[in-house]
Image (cartoon, helix red, strand yellow):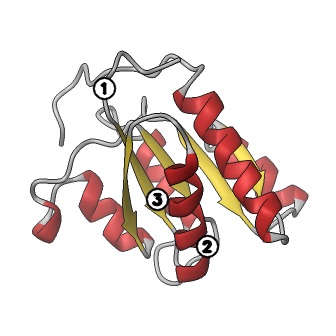
Amino acid sequence: MSYSGQVIDILLVEDNPGDAKLVQKAFELGKLANRIWHVPDGERALQFLHHEGEFAEAPRPDIILLDLNMPGIDGREVLSHIKNSPDLMTIPVIIMTTSSAEQDILESYKLHVNCYITKPVQVQDFITVVKTIDEFWIGVVKLPRHATSDS
């Protein structure tokens, strides 16, 4: 399956460099065309989404993989901003975090996250989870195209 033969832009918001590399490597192992744009914190994620500063030419992502616990602007604030923005709210957001706390899961769904995944501890399990995201969210799910102008 493919996404209309188009390249999928994935924004990865992850402050742990090791986890970011694992996600990128796992997507490389997939068979679908995608580009991963990595930012290490919530502030840069918002700049990316609003095409500010160094991200003036950034694409609108088709999917966002978002960590919850980051310094400064955390994932909850980024998620809230995305889901309350008419220009961004249709972008699917997948929380991928170490937290399995019921409060974090509930709060994320109240903020309209599309999916909540707890990062596995074992490297092979982590890669399997990312490959599953690739297969499902890019290979199976019908993603919205950019119907509105970027803000």
Q: Quick one: quadrant of the C terminus?
A: top left
The x, y position of residue 28, in whole percent, is 49, 52
Q: Which mark is residue 43?
A: none
Query: Circle 3 sits on which residue?
Result: 12
Q: Nearer the viewer, mark 2 or mark 3?
A: 2
Marks 2 and 3, Cα distance to the nearest angstrom?
10 Å
The x, y position of residue 118, in whole percent, is 79, 58
Marks 1 and 3, Cα distance to the nearest angstrom?
19 Å
Query: Circle 2 sits on which residue?
Result: 19
Q: Quadrant of residue 146?
A: top left
**Position of 53 relative to 15 (above/below):** above
For residue 10, side relative to residue 101 (left or right): left
Q: Amino acid at mark 2?
A: Asp
Q: Amino acid at mark 1?
A: Gln
First-in-chain label (1 vs 3): 1
Residue 16 seen in the figure: no
Q: Amino acid at mark 3?
A: Leu
Image point (73%, 47%), residue name: 116
The x, y position of residue 3, in whole percent, is 42, 21
First-in-chain label (2 vs 3): 3
Q: Which mark is residue 6?
A: 1
Tag 2 and tag 3, C-beta contact below 8 Å: no
First-in-chain label (2 vs 1): 1
Image point (29%, 34%), residue name: 87
**Position of 120 relative to 11 (above/below):** below
**Position of 116 relative to 136 (above/below):** below
Are there few (<14), some (14-19), or many (20+) residues within 10 Å of tag 3?
many
Q: Secondary structure at mark 1?
A: loop
